[in-house]
Amino acid sequence: MSCFPALSSPLFAYDASSTDFKELISLLEQQSALYGWIDIKPGDIQWEYYRTTKNKHPLIFTHFGNSAGNCILFIGCVHGDELPTAYLMFRLIHYIKDNPALFKDKCIVIAPLVNPDGFLSSSPTRVNASGVDINRNFPTKDWQAKAIRQWIAKGKNNRYYPGAKPASEQETLFQMALIKRFKPQKILSVHSPLNFFDYDGPSSDLNSFEQWMEQICKETNHPLKKFGYFPGSLGNYAGHERNIFTLTLELPSSDPQKGREYFQKFQPSILKFINLPVVGLPPHVKIINDYSPVSGG
Ligand SMILES: [Zn+2]
């Protein structure tokens, strides 16, 4: 299956028979069993990968649909110890695969496990195998001036180390490559355990996005919090600098056993985000928020 023939000219083709790939699938199956994720079947999904991590784990993703210009990117487990975020993304992949109408006129790209080294560590870690917080390592315009300085000012917490240089990590380059190749209009990144929705996006239409978010939060009974963005964060790189509507879902806990409960709770809003129309070209993009909540009852 090949999508975007004009865009898909990666330097290295992936190899599903490679030892690294087989090992990753096997480890994912073991972890899924350990966490009780019995409805996750990593071996049944058609993956692509072009990069591996320091610990030789492939950075996998999958995509559905061919419609360039109407693309949404999902990102899970950027922080390796946020376990249910991986489950949520794997479940979403199975759900979308089983419901092709969802991607008939769209392109849906899902990278469920951006930090496999942290996730598969004997004691899962937020940072990657080099000790870098991937969500502080994007090459944002303020990185050089602020990333290290803020990290030092806040007490040099190892969990938030932005790296020695911007975009120094494969996991960061992986996400940048997905954004470059698929040109998503919308991104949903799942984290835990801060328990809110946050959003970043083009200044041309941040208000409509906020109004839409307020409706979604009310329906889902999940708080909305404008958390702001950091030097090197995805919200800054994609939302603020690249005019992509970027939604962050912070789950209420990092308990892997809660994965199924969270999927039930957030699936309706995830589907609404998939179907939320975006029009125009950056930087003048807008969302069409003609959605009215079901009244009565
Ligand atoms: Zn996180």
Image: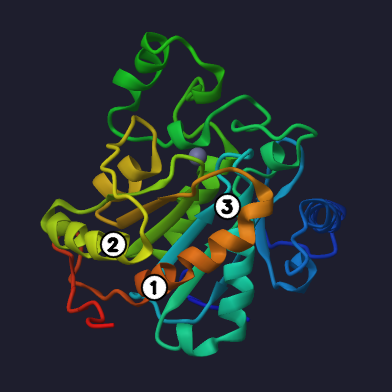
To which quarter of the image does residue 292 belong?
A: bottom left
Name the residue carrying label 3. Answer: 85
To which quarter of the image does residue 194 belong?
A: top left
Amino acid type, mark 2: Lys
Disc 1 and disc 3 in contact, CB within 8 angstroms: no
Q: CA distance from mark 3 to mark 2?
A: 22 Å
- First in sequence: mark 2 vs mark 1: 2
Residue 256 seen in render: yes
> Is residue 285 placed above or below 230 in the rendered structure?
below
Name the residue carrying label 2. Answer: 218
Residue 20 in picture, x, y percent from top left: 82, 51
Camera-side mark, 2 or 1: 2
The residue sitting at 77% across, 42% down in the picture is: 56
Tag 3 secondary structure: helix
Disc 3 and disc 2 in contact, CB within 8 angstroms: no
The 10 Å Cα crowd at callout 2, few under 14, some 14 to 19, many 20 or more, is: few
Q: Taking 195 as reference, is 81 left or right?
A: right
Amino acid type, mark 1: Ile
Residue 23 in picture, x, y percent from top left: 86, 53
Name the residue carrying label 1. Answer: 274
Amino acid type, mark 3: Thr
Tag 1 secondary structure: helix
Camera-side mark, 3 or 2: 2
In what quadrant of the picture does the C terminus appear? bottom left
In what quadrant of the picture does the N terminus appear? bottom right
Q: Residue furthest front?
A: 297
> Is residue 21 placed above or below 265 in the rendered structure?
above
The residue sitting at 56% across, 78% down in the picture is: 96
- First in sequence: mark 1 vs mark 3: 3
